[in-house]
Image (cartoon, rainbow, N blue to C red):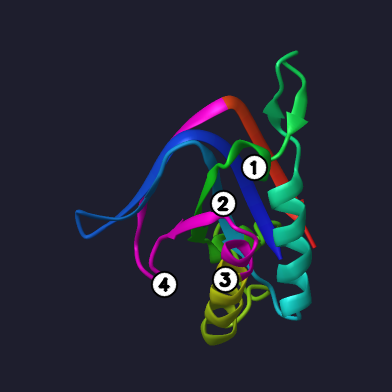
Amino acid sequence: MKVVLQKCKEAKVVVNDEIVGEIGRGFTLLVGFQEGDTEQSCDWMAEKIVHLRVFEDENEKMNRSLLDEVGSILSVSQFTLYGDCTKGRRPNFMKAARPAEAEALYDYFNKVLRDKGVQVATGIFGEMMDVSLVNEGPVTLILEK
């Protein structure tokens, strides 16, 4: 499982000219799954994300988590995170989980985040999406499990 996390001031995802997910301050997550990922991978990742201390405290130190800030998450499925570009000019996606498996894990991951008390907005799995955000910091992290 791989997540590209961006701390944001606001973010939204649009499908067919319609906003399907939108948040204020929090995290935009691009979420990808590979063959062999499990619900335990999702549990670990969700726990890591909600407790990651990347928000500034009163001393401008990164000491506060998403839960401390009562921030939101925009979660967007992103199978291209597992594109292998080492050979040729076209990415190979053989390591990415099959769509049915990835969708089930994606749904489970978002449920775990919600169960931790976080507001989670999403895109639509498998659709072409336009994602926009105002990256705060900028803070961008790549997390893998």
Mark earlier in primary sequence (2, 4): 2
Q: Which mark is residue 111?
A: 3
> Where the N terminus falls, by quadrant?
bottom right
Kindly identify the residue that appears in the image at 53 percent across and 61 percent down: 78
Label 3 with label 2: CB-CB less than 8 Å = no
Q: Which residue is mark 1?
A: 66
Amino acid bearing label 1 = Leu
Measured in 3D between alpha carbons, the distance from the residue under mark 3 to the one under mark 1, in whole angstroms, is 16 Å
Residue at horizontal 52 percent and vertical 35 percent from the top: 8
- Residue 136 appears at what percent x and percent y? 55, 27
Q: Is residue 43 above or below residue 22?
A: below
Q: CA distance from mark 3 to mark 2?
A: 14 Å
Rendering quarter of residue 128: bottom left
Q: What segment carries the magenta color? A: 112-136
Check disc 1 and report its element: helix, strand or loop.
helix
Which element carries disc 3, helix, strand or loop?
Answer: helix
The amino acid at mark 4 is Gly
Instruction: State which mark lies toward you, 1 or 2.
Output: 1
Of pointers 3 and 1, the one earlier in the residue sequence: 1
Residue identifier under label 4: 126
Crowd rating for badge 4 (residues with CA inside 10 Å; few <14, some 14–19, many 20+): few
Nearest to the observer: residue 103 or residue 65: 65
Residue at image coords 70%, 16%? 58
Q: CA distance from mark 3 to mark 4?
A: 18 Å
Dot label at residue 29: 2
- Where is residue 125 drawn, in percent x and y? 43, 71
Does the magenta portion include 127? Answer: yes
